[in-house]
Image (tube, rainbow, N blue to C red):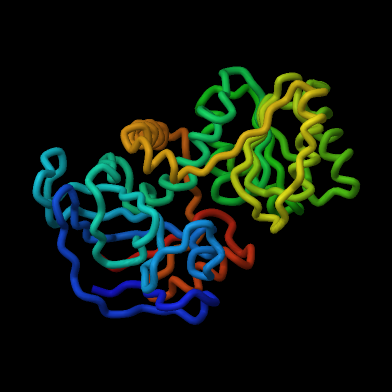
């Protein structure tokens, strides 16, 4: 089989395809013929050796893939050869054939293509747990999504509306990304490139929420945007830290949380996958159901062949992606 193979941590451009032995599933595992893989920001950090979890070298990156089960390991009774499934793993998805624990796959509804199912994986899972578990979103509440034109931001915009938010605001930098946030479903947008962001973000939010502020902030951005978003929270508001796409980890003063009666929490989605795969499966089932009903659109921007995985990752790294980037194996 062919796979995007990393033999040493380093720049994206220094890696490429390799011919590797075909794998076989062990007990409790499945072998999937991969049709499509999902490209995500953490993949860049993993390949470059900057992620919090470093796989043992050599390894295959990639956290999600969709395809068809071609072999079933001993002890697996709830999956069968020929099923179309989405697999979500820590790494290993950028390949033609993937061995995965049976508990980490979900059946793909007939209404969805491999590409759609792949794009509805990691970022929608992340947004789901950020909104439902960490933010405790209730129907009728207002939500601000930072980085709204990115993968997690796009997913959070759409899921917040599907989950019953009364108003969803998209935060992004510049006219093009703000327009994309509107296209993706934002009821209103706020410009994260505005001067004096600490004050301007709060003022922009208040202007479109009748002065109320927002009940929840989903934050994959970090940096100055986090500090500014805290000031836009309503009483008992919650901000969920997902990542630091801006490149800066913010410092949050605890006294500000006390004075405003607000809360800040963090989310690392892989813990949900590893600690409670059944919970992850239930979340994915609902995400797929929303998509099949037309309530979610993963907005696939580009699809590259597996051989161009380095190029696809570089486009994401350089901020050139306006939506999801996928890899197709040709299977």
Task: Decide which of 39, 63 is in the foreground and name it.
Answer: 63
Image point (36%, 68%), residue name: 60
Question: Which quadrant does the C terminus fall into?
Answer: bottom left
Q: Residue at x 55, y 70 (%)?
A: 314
Res. 23 image quadrant: bottom left
Question: Which image quarter holds the N terminus?
Answer: bottom left
Question: Is 67 on the left-hand or right-hand side of 138?
Answer: left
State the residue at coordinates (27%, 67%).
Answer: 96
Q: Residue at x 34, y 59 (%)?
A: 36
Q: Is residue 292 visible?
A: no
**253 in relation to 216, above or below:** below
Horizontal relation, residue 78 to residue 167: left or right: left
Total numbered labels placed on residues in the image: 0
Residue 7 percent across, percent down from the top left? 40, 78
Q: Name the spot of residue 219 as percent of width and height, x first.
A: 65, 42
Residue 110 placement, left or right of 204:
left
Q: x%, y% of residue 159?
A: 52, 33
């Amino acid at each position: 089989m062919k796979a995007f193979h990393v033999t040493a941590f380093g720049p994206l451009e220094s890696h490429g395809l390799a011919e590797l032995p075909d794998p076989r599933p062990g007990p409790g595992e499945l072998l999937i013929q991969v049709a499509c893989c999902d490209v995500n920001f953490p993949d860049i950090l993993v390949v470059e050796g900057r992620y919090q979890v470093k796989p043992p070298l050599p390894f295959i990156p990639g956290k999600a893939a969709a395809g068809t089960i071609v072999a079933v390991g001993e002890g697996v009774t709830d999956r069968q050869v020929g099923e179309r499934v989405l697999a979500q793993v820590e790494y290993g998805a950028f390949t033609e054939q993937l061995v995965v624990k049976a508990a980490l796959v979900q059946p793909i509804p007939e209404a969805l293509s491999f590409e759609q199912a792949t794009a509805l994986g990691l970022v929608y899972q992340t947004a789901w747990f950020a909104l439902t578990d960490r933010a405790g979103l209730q129907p009728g509440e207002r939500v601000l999504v930072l980085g709204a034109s990115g993968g997690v931001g796009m997913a959070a915009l759409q899921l917040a509306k599907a989950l019953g938010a009364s108003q969803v605001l998209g935060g992004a930098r510049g006219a093009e990304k703000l327009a994309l946030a509107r296209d993706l479903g934002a009821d209103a947008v706020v410009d994260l490139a505005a001067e004096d962001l600490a004050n301007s973000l709060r003022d922009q939010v208040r202007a479109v929420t009748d002065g109320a502020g927002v009940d929840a902030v989903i934050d994959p951005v970090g940096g100055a945007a986090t500090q500014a978003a805290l000031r836009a929270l309503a009483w008992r508001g919650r901000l969920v830290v997902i990542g630091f796409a801006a490149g800066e980890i913010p410092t949050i003063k605890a006294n500000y949380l006390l004075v405003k009666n607000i809360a800040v929490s963090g989310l690392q989605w892989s813990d949900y996958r590893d600690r409670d795969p059944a919970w992850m499966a239930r979340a994915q089932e609902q995400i797929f159901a929303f998509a099949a009903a037309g309530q979610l659109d993963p907005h696939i921007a580009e699809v590259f062949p597996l051989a161009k995985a380095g190029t696809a990752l570089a486009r994401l790294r350089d901020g050139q992606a306006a939506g999801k980037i996928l890899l197709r194996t040709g299977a």
